[in-house]
Image (spheres, helix red, strand yellow):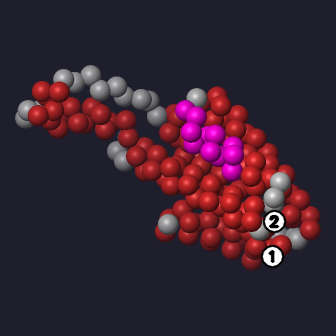
Amino acid sequence: MDRARQLAGEVLLCLFLVLLGTGIYSMTQPSVAYNGALDSVYSDGSLDSLYSMVSYYNAQDGLLAQLLHGDVSTMFLAGTVVWALLGRYREGPAVFALGLLMLLVSNTWVHLAAALVVAVILVRSSWQEARVNRRTPGFVAATLAFTAFLVVVI
């Protein structure tokens, strides 16, 4: 049970790094405002107006980053519930509440502050778990493989 809890915490830490990377990438992309008229959408020039809306996504990289960010955030919240059920009764609900705060509040500074607190909690508990149960190369490989499975397959 201790190794399962440690694995869940390490996977949460890896998922958080994916969330951080996709969030920073999404923040650095310029936002594009749609300034076209509605009649141009229905005329022959509809592809031009549609292109002005979609150009934000930078040839699907931005769209992929946003979709990945949303999917991984859902997996992150579900993982915090599993992590709390496996024995992290104190940290699990706090990380879950901060994750919900980041999901529901669109203010960038609140989002970043909550993310910083989540990062501190995850790293601190990871260090505590590693003091009791050492990380072996096989354990690290299992953590990375499980994280890759969650991100790519699911």
Whole-number angstrom distance, CA of label 1 to CA of label 2 = 9 Å
Q: Secondary structure at mark 2?
A: loop
- Which residue range is magenta in the image? 96-106
Q: What's the magenta bit mostly, secondary-structure-wise?
A: helix
Q: Residues within 10 Å of mark 2 (few under 14, many from 20)?
A: some
Q: Are marks 1 and 2 in contact (CB under 8 Å)?
A: yes
Q: Which residue is mark 1?
A: 1
> Residue 42's x, y, as percent?
11, 34
Q: Is residue 101 left or right of residue 90?
A: left
> Residue 6's x, y, as percent?
79, 67
> Residue 53's x, y, as percent?
30, 34
Residue sitting at x 52%, y 34%: 28
In this view, the residue in front, 87 or 38, is 87
Residue 108 higher or lower than 103, as above or below: above
In this view, the residue in front, 5 or 30, is 5
Q: Is residue 24 left or right of residue 45?
A: right
Residue 124 higher or lower than 85, as above or below: above
Q: Is residue 100 magenta?
A: yes
Q: Residues within 10 Å of mark 1 (few under 14, many from 20)?
A: few
The three-letter amino acid code for the residue at tag 2 is Gly
> Residue 21's x, y, as percent?
59, 46
Does the rendering let one see residue 93?
yes
